[in-house]
């Protein structure tokens, strides 16, 4: 009896211990490295503390600048990093899950005053960008925000459309319209390298698309710029998206699997071997609809088929610096069909679209000493597209009206030197050469001659040289200025631009900041436009646009930022932009201007005699995510105008005149076992903006010609309806030991608003048709990390 009692007591004690161990609160490790922001050298002895937790959690950096904090509670936390002689920095709103370690690189800024004079100034760390040379019209884009904002669909390009001065389009793509400029003025960079349009189903000349090939599971915090860019950035006149990839975990293997409407994907990361700080990170995604179509589960045309692969391999060495190999590849196709509802859904026009993109690059960073380092890169990119367009001629017959195959390669080499002279002064200078190779063919149906005509047929190459120098001077803790030059030369025709840039930031006190800047910027037209040709009577070829200049713009910015609470700020920003050397139609009286282009390219004869003006006022009211709640209110009032060859100033296509956003969300911690932490998130976005402009269709002339004809004398004189869109997302996350599961339900245009966006001519029915705002778009996503 006693033995049985002893056994029962042992068993009961064991069960209590087991239950106690299972009831332990979930926790995770936060680790990383602390470096000097300007010189990137590790800081030894820096302190990192987790804020607002009991008991106190923290760590100090060792000889290599690395730190480790274990048993950090799962949830959202903030860190405070401090180091003697440097300004404190808060890293807010870090999402800690049970499945993945949090690995950070924290950059601290050396104090511009002596130790005896140091004044602690809250420099609004929650709005800082990665590029220390950017003082105006810049915003960091975090992965956490991209996944949290309703309507973003985990796409950073869609997410930034909630920022002041930025809007998307009602066509359904992720094109980025910045301060009334054409999306063609956007520059995309990946790991510091200029890349082609990183979207599926993209063509030459476009910068957006329906689906981004950049996967949010691969991204680190990145920078987005809307005006007066730092001297480092060239070949852009409207905006810059500087994307960074995160490094994989260099101590443990981690996996993420996701399945949803957009695609099926897998992410793999981990170390190469124990004791080596190198790591790998890979992601592959395949279209869900393409998979279902291949299995015979779909019975409709126009199935979008795409797949993409991205990777980053981090290879540090003891003496030769750090090497980083990265890449992005995507392939997509769709058979798009246009049907006439009045003819029982009869297909009247079709486009067989094929697109591809690829980027592979090798970056090298090496420290010369504690004040200077060199960044160098080699990369090769490729993008191509092909379109076969057919229109119905009779009930049983189609004719080919568009046939193009466009392919472009870019081999790029760059080097950037960073020198920190002291706590007040830093020099940054660099050179980039890009060798472009292209193979283009473009044929279109000529309705006057009744046959296909070739406009582009070339297999050649050219080059683009860019250089810059940038100087940052900190007069004191409160006043900082950046000045420099950017130079660009297009070797195809010798077109060049010398571009001065200057900006300042004055932190009046811990709550008030004033800033301003000026920059001259330029961008190439799509390469295809330089190569448009005609055959002369003597049989020779005339490239009539080969001497096009770069499109140029002057940007002026002034702003004020008021931190009215530790977690909320109000920002006002005014801007003026003057664009010149804009390609416009060469025919006297022509009303064509490239400032109204949406994507693709034109084969029209062009001259650089156009101008444009954009000016406006922007407001941002934001509460950063804190205590489970956040909001973002943005508003823009602006005017965007263009002047073509006829000398008349008019509204651009993108002159919506106003845009507004309300983004807000709440996160709820649900009761449950200690070993299972559940979180429910509800996020919404309300978007209201003016409609874009379009040129009305001349129906009689279209019928007579057999093709769409617009009233060229009335360019962009008709405005579409104002756009209203309500987006909603609901997320549910469960953290278990070593595993995190999440479910996301998202819907765009929940209220089914049906605004008029554009018109087109239906050549078969000989009627004008309307393009309306996209209906509700539901998205479901399930994922698991372990």
Image (cartoon, rainbow, N blue to C red):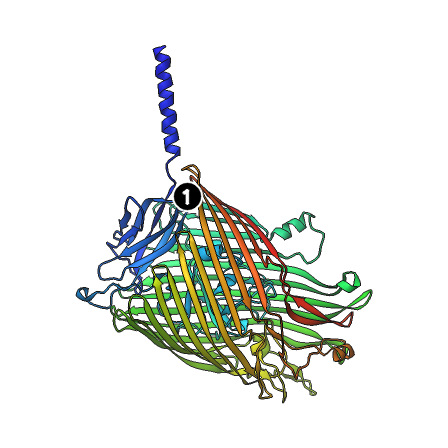
644 on left or right of 130:
right
Residue 162 % position (x, y): 49, 64
Query: Which residue occupies the foreground of this view, 358 or 350?
Result: 350
591 on left or right of 707:
left
Residue 349 % position (x, y): 73, 66
Give the answer, above or below, for where 371 lies relative to 69: below
Q: Name the residue under label 1.
A: 98
Residue depicted at x 73% and y 67%: 390
Q: How many labels does the image show?
A: 1
Residue 93 % position (x, y): 38, 54
Q: In which quarter of the image is the N terminus?
A: top left
Whether residue 299 can be seen here? yes
Query: Which residue occupies the foreground of this view, 408 or 602?
Result: 602
Residue 493 % position (x, y): 52, 82
Query: Which residue occupies the foreground of this view, 519 or 328?
Result: 519
Q: Residues within 10 Å of mark 1 (few under 14, many from 20)?
A: many
Whether residue 318 can be seen here? no
Query: Which residue occupies the foreground of this view, 599 or 136?
Result: 136
451 on left or right of 554:
right
Q: Residue furthest right?
A: 395
567 on left or right of 394:
left
Q: Residue furthest top?
A: 1
Q: In which quarter of the image is residue 688?
A: bottom right
SS assignment at label 1: loop
């Amino acid at each position: 009896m006693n033995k049985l009692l002893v056994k029962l007591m042992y068993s009961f004690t064991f069960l209590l211990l087991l239950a106690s161990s299972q009831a332990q609160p979930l926790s995770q490790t936060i680790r990383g490295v602390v470096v000097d922001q300007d010189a990137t050298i590790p800081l030894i002895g820096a302190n990192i503390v987790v804020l607002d937790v009991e008991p106190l959690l923290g760590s100090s950096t060792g000889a290599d600048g690395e730190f480790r904090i274990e048993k950090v509670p799962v949830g959202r936390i903030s860190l405070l990093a401090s180091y003697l002689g440097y300004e404190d920095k808060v890293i807010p709103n870090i999402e800690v899950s049970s499945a993945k370690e949090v690995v950070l690189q924290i950059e601290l800024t050396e104090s511009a005053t002596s130790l005896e004079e140091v004044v602690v100034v809250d420099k609004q760390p929650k709005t800082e960008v990665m590029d220390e040379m950017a003082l105006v019209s810049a915003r960091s884009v975090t992965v956490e925000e991209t996944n949290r904002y309703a309507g973003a669909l985990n796409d950073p390009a869609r997410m930034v459309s909630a920022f002041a001065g930025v809007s998307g389009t009602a066509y359904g793509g992720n094109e980025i319209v910045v301060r009334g400029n054409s999306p063609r003025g956007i520059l995309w960079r990946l790991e510091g390298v200029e890349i082609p349009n990183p979207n599926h189903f993209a063509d030459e000349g476009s910068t957006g698309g329906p689906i981004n090939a950049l996967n949010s599971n691969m991204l680190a915090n990145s920078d987005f710029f809307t005006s007066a860019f730092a001297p480092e950035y060239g070949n852009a006149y409207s905006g810059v998206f500087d994307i960074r990839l995160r490094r994989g975990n260099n101590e443990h293997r981690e996996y993420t699997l996701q399945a949803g409407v957009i695609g099926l994907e897998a992410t793999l990361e981990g170390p190469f071997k124990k004791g080596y700080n190198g790591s790998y990170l890979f992601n592959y995604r395949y279209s869900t609809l393409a998979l279902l179509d291949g299995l015979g589960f779909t019975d409709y045309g126009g199935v979008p088929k795409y797949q993409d692969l991205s990777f980053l391999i981090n290879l540090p060495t003891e003496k030769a610096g750090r090497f980083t190999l990265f890449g992005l590849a995507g392939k997509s196709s769709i058979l798009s069909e246009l049907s006439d509802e009045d003819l029982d859904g009869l297909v009247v026009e079709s486009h067989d679209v094929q697109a591809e993109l690829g980027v592979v690059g090798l970056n090298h960073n090496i420290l010369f000493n504690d004040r200077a380092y060199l960044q160098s890169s080699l990369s090769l990119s490729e993008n191509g597209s092909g379109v076969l367009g057919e229109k119905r001629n009779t009930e049983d017959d189609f004719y080919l009206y568009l046939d193009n195959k466009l392919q472009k390669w870019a081999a790029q080499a760059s080097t950037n030197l960073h020198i920190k002279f002291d706590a007040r002064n830093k020099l940054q200078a660099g050179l980039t050469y890009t060798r472009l190779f292209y193979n283009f063919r473009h044929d279109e149906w000529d309705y006057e001659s009744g046959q296909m005509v070739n406009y582009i047929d070339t297999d050649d190459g050219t080059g683009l040289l860019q250089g810059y120098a940038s100087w940052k001077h900190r007069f004191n803790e409160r006043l900082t200025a950046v000045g420099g030059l950017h130079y660009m030369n297009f070797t195809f025709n010798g077109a060049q631009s010398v571009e001065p840039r200057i900006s300042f930031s004055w932190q009046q006190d811990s709550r008030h900041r004033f800033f301003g800047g000026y920059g001259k910027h330029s961008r190439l037209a799509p390469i295809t436009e330089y190569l448009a040709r005609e055959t002369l009577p003597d049989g020779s070829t005339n490239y009539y646009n080969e001497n096009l200049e770069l499109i140029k713009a002057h940007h002026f910015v002034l702003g004020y930022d008021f931190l009215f609470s530790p977690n909320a700020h109000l920002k006002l920003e005014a801007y003026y932009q003057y664009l010149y050397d804009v390609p416009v139609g060469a025919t006297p009286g022509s009303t064509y201007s490239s400032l109204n282009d949406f994507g693709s390219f034109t084969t029209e004869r062009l001259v650089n005699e156009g101008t444009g003006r954009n000016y406006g006022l922007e407001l941002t009211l934001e509460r950063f995510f804190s205590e489970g709640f956040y909001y973002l209110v943005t508003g823009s009032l602006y005017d965007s105008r263009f002047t073509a060859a006829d000398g008349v100033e008019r509204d651009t296509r993108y002159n919506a005149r106003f845009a507004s956003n309300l983004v807000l969300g709440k996160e709820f911690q649900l009761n449950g076992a200690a070993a299972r932490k559940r979180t429910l998130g509800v996020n919404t976005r309300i978007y209201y903006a003016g409609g874009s402009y379009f040129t009305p269709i001349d129906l009689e002339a279209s019928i007579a010609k057999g093709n769409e004809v617009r009233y060229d004398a009335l360019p962009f004189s008709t405005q579409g309806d104002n756009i209203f869109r309500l987006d909603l997302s609901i997320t549910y996350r469960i953290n278990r030991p070593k595993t995190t599961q999440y479910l996301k339900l998202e819907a765009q245009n929940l209220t089914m608003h049906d605004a008029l966006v554009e018109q087109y001519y239906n050549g078969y029915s000989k009627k004008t048709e309307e393009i309306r705002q996209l209906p509700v778009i539901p998205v479901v996503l399930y994922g698991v990390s372990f």
